[in-house]
Amino acid sequence: MTPPRSVLIVGASAAGLSTAEALRRQGHQGRLTLLDAEPHLPYDRPPLSKQVLAGDWEPGRAQLRSQAQLDALDAEFVRGEAAVAFDAGAREVRTATGRVLRADAVVIATGLTPHRLPGQQGQAGMREPAGMQGPAGMREPAGMQGPAGMRGPGQQGLAGVHELRGLDDALTLRAHLTAARRLVVVGEGVLGGELAATARKLGLDVTLVGLGQAILADQLGGRVSGLLTRAHAERGVELRLGVAVEELTSAGGRVTGVRLATGEVLPADAVVVAIGSRPATGWLAGSGLSLGDGVECDARCRAAEGVYAVGDVASWQHEGLGRRLRLENRTNATEQAQVVAANILGADRPYTPIPYFWTDQYDIKIQAHGLPSATAEVSIVEGDPEQGRFAAVYREDGRVTGVLGWNMPKQARVLRQQHLATQPVATA
Amino acid sequence: MKITVDEDKCCGAGSCVLIAPEVFDQREDDGIVILLDAEPGAGQHAAVREAAAVCPGAAIEVSE
């Protein structure tokens, strides 16, 4: 196979940018273009709900690379311009301004679009039909939204209701939280837990609402999620778990609270919705690509001839697991980027990672390697939960499927090497 | 090659240790990166570049 003379990457967040860097490092000398709806230089997302929201970092600290490093890539950056259509056969991307970009190889790295609550955007007339929202990795810059992109409920929908996907979301939320008193966090996943922890640090009264029985119950199982939920309660978070949200209540276009299915109304002057996301594939409708839970790729992360997907948006066949996988975590963005770049340049590498995510909430640092499922049997192998430090091994049918550290990052990594490295979740 | 690490950005994943154990380690108590060799020999360069590339905290900088 002849290496492509030109590569176009759609989305310049962690996955897209890492792919560009890996291409250069692995010897791509041809044209390299990155198209991104974000007006900002590429930035990192994990700090948004923590250091940036808390005000511990000025926003520039979340920037992934300096201008000099970006310049050294010798790439063309098309910023503040969303992709709106794609023809996979022609490898041709059309942007919101009507520009058409084509390349020998195209990489899809458009990330996620947050789910929203009904009514989150205020007036019914302003709500977009499902599936028509712009990709989250490709947000229109504030003030540039057209009628089809009524994004940012803080500005254009119900005032006081937030989501957190991009840097502008984090800054808007931070500005509001410094003035607000009562925050309701909707969602008991990683983002919901981190938001609640940061808001407590900022001194707000926080209530966390979620459908699950515990914070991170789906990701970490009952035992560890129970400890994490208790940690939130001990730090003053009011919890409403195992309960659905009925609606947002409002007066004069501003949110006043959250009504639960139980009938209870939680008063709030700020609400942040963190109920998960979906792959940002709206712009790929009619592209010829197979879209399921994300862009469906083969084991080499190829979606079609000369078309690849990377990061949160990519669903690929994990040869070790023998099934399709899509990971929404930061590590996957950079690890998958290395493999995608190699395959673009002619390698034939299946992508078979050991999944990994971390979350920092208060003084608790959790590291999870592998797939620590909710149904696994959990044994504490080091430390003691009551002392605030431990490491655990997750087993299903006697096989280790995941390892976890709770304020024991190094030990978790060593456990990964002992239990997962030689059988990289491959036996699951 | 010269390596610098930003402890404040390190999330303790240990990806760098998995890739280049002769150059990186982690502190026992909090898992933060320890730079064992800031100017490693040529034999380590490819591994170090990969470690910097995949670091989920974007905490490793390499200048050549």
Image: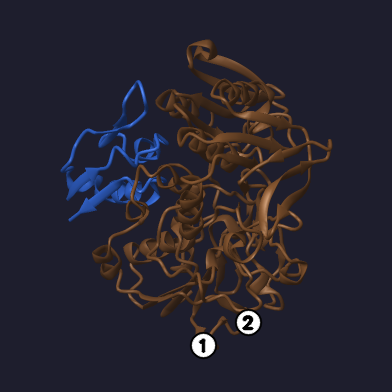
**Residue B12 relative to residue A406: left or right:** left
Which secondary structure, mark 2? Answer: loop
Q: Is residue A358 visible?
A: no
Residue flagged by tag 1: what amino acid is it?
Arg
Q: Secondary structure at mark 1?
A: loop
Question: Which mark is on residue A172?
Answer: none
Labels 2 and 1 within one chain = yes
Of the residues under marks 2 and 1, which one precedes in the sequence?
Answer: 2
Where residue A40 appears, x then y in whole percent? 40, 66
Q: Amino acid at mark 2?
A: Gly
- Which tint is chain B? blue
Quadrant the C terminus of chain A occupies: top right
Marked residue chain, label 1 = A
Q: Nearer the viewer, mark 2 or mark 1?
A: 1
Could you tell me residue A371's position as x and y percent?
A: 62, 35
* Residue at the limit of the structure toward the front, as seen here: A252
Q: Which chain is brown?
A: A
Q: Is residue A284 above or below residue A373?
A: below
Which chain hosts label 2? A
The residue that disc 1 covers is A99
Q: Which residue corresponds to the image point at 56% horizontal and 36% vertical from the top-left?
A: A196
A355 shown above or below A13: above
Residue A261 locus on image (x, y percent): 83, 40
> Residue at 17% of width from left, 44% of height from top?
B41
Rendered view: A130 above or below A244:
below
Viewer-proximal residue, B38 or A318? B38
Cα–Cα gap, marks 2 and 1: 18 Å
Q: Are marks 2 and 1 in contact (CB under 8 Å)?
A: no
Which residue is labeled 2 in the image? A89
Q: Could you say where residue A167 lies in the image, as x and y percent from the top left?
A: 46, 57
**A4 displayed left or right of A304:** left
Q: What residue is at 57 percent from the left and 55 percent from the top?
A: A312
